[in-house]
Image: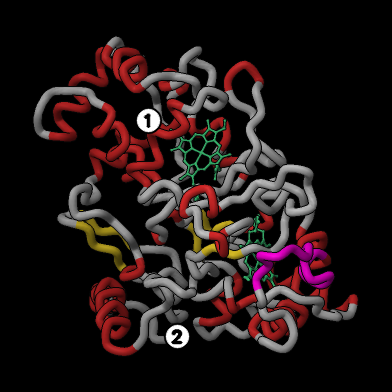
Amino acid sequence: MRSRSLPRLGTIRAAFVLLAAIPFAAGLSCSAGAPPQAPAAAPQGETLTSGQFTMVLPLGLQADAAYIPDANPLTQAKIELGRKLYFDTRLSKDGTVSCATCHDPDKGFSDNRPVSLGINGQSGARNAPTVMNRLFSKEQFWDGRAADLEAQALGPVQNPIEMGHTLEGMVSNLQAIQPYDAEFASTFGSPGINADRVAQAIASYERTVVTGNAPYDRYQAGDKKAMSESAVRGMAIFNDAERGNCVTCHAGFNFTDESYHNLGVGMDKPIPDLGRYVVTKQEFDKGGFKTPTLRNITLTPPYMHDGSDATLQAVVDFYDRGGIKNPWQSKEIHPLNLSDQDKADLVAFLEALTGEVRGTERPTLPK
Ligand code: HEC
Ligand code: HEC
């Protein structure tokens, strides 16, 4: 089951290539006096537009695949307010946990733990996914239970083992911090701190946390030296339905079909996490989890929804074995019979997906 955000073709793409080319052309005309042998400009990323706001995306990301709800267009003010709220531990009940505690820019916007630790050191049941490139996904969480980032943002605040608060409690915490009053008013055009505004601001900031311009993207843009020979071989295995078959699910520029699949991860536990099934109650969704992006995957071990694979080598071995058999396993998962060299090449390719990260700047929090 593929979804809407697969890479587009044809005319739409051409429009964005044109857009992206404008700053490049302008740059050329300004530098008319430059020596003729000046090196060609590096390939440009596409330009994302939302209302009055524009941002040039890192190379390799597709602007028209972005999901931004009409009710919450990006503005610089919302992004900056959201950045503060994201890093502010005062959103949690005891003032110790912020979004960045579990989605830390220094840890690939995750926490490098198998499962997360929340307030009072309580641990949850799932691995914290990265917040990078959420711009390109509508549904959020491993099981897709949040309709969008706005709906997602208030979940952890109220989760008893994450931030352990109530929405009313969070709002009154923020109301007690005087500079936030003025910032909410100027950002939203009228006074008032409320949960919806908090969610809109955090979601806006998260949409600027993007990664691209990896060796893979430079290779695709024509720099054939950007990836090692091993990574190039790994890419062929990744894309080949008879060999790795990875691209069937990790499809498109963000390496995900935004759909749910059962690989068998955790299905051998006494009480398995049934994932997507809990949301849809559809039999075929048992043990299904959302295909994660593979961009910057080197930064966010351990892997899988339960953190059960410590390394990328372990992930590739898991696929090579054909996952864990269970009645609901995807038909796309079966033993691969990869050689040691094939496995090393696949890992080299996964490593070539690590690139530039935007949105890591930490804010100064109001007192
Ligand atoms: C205690 C650790 C913890 C805290 C604090 C936390 N998260 Fe998470 N976050 C997680 C875990 C674990 C998941 C996966 C849960 C699931 O899928 O059921 C998750 C999932 C997400 C996702 C979904 C990503 C995807 O690929 O679907 C987003 C977005 C997110 N968190 C943003 C936030 C924001 C914004 C905050 C602050 C308001 C926050 N998180 C606070 C641990 C945390
Ligand atoms: C049938 C769809 C499907 C196929 C085929 C597939 N994947 Fe995945 N991949 C997923 C899903 C779904 C998850 C999350 C599973 C879970 O946690 O239960 C995942 C998780 C991963 C992860 C861990 C990501 C993270 O953030 O924890 C990596 C790495 C990965 N896949 C690489 C690959 C490679 C390499 C191949 C080919 C050998 C491949 N995948 C084939 C769907 C697929």
The amino acid beneath tag 2 is Gln
Q: Is residue 260 covered in magenta? A: no
Q: Residue at x 41, y 59 (%)?
A: 137
The amino acid beneath tag 1 is Lys
Q: Determine whether the beta carbon of the residue marked 1 sits less than 8 angstroms from the nearest atom of ligand 1.
A: no
* The residue stretch that appears in magenta: 318-330
Compared to 142, does 41 lie above or below? below
Along the horizontal axis of the image, is 48 left or right of 94? left
Any part of residue 358 in sight: no
Tell me the chief SS of the magenta region: loop
**Disc 2 designates what residue?**
37
Q: Residue at x 72, y 77 (%)?
A: 231
**Disc 1 designates what residue?**
84
Along the horizontal axis of the image, is 318 left or right of 10? right
Percent across and percent down for residue 355 are 57, 61
Picture quarter containing residue 136?
bottom left
Of residues 328 and 123, the one nearer the viewer is 328
Q: CA distance from mark 2 to mark 1?
A: 45 Å
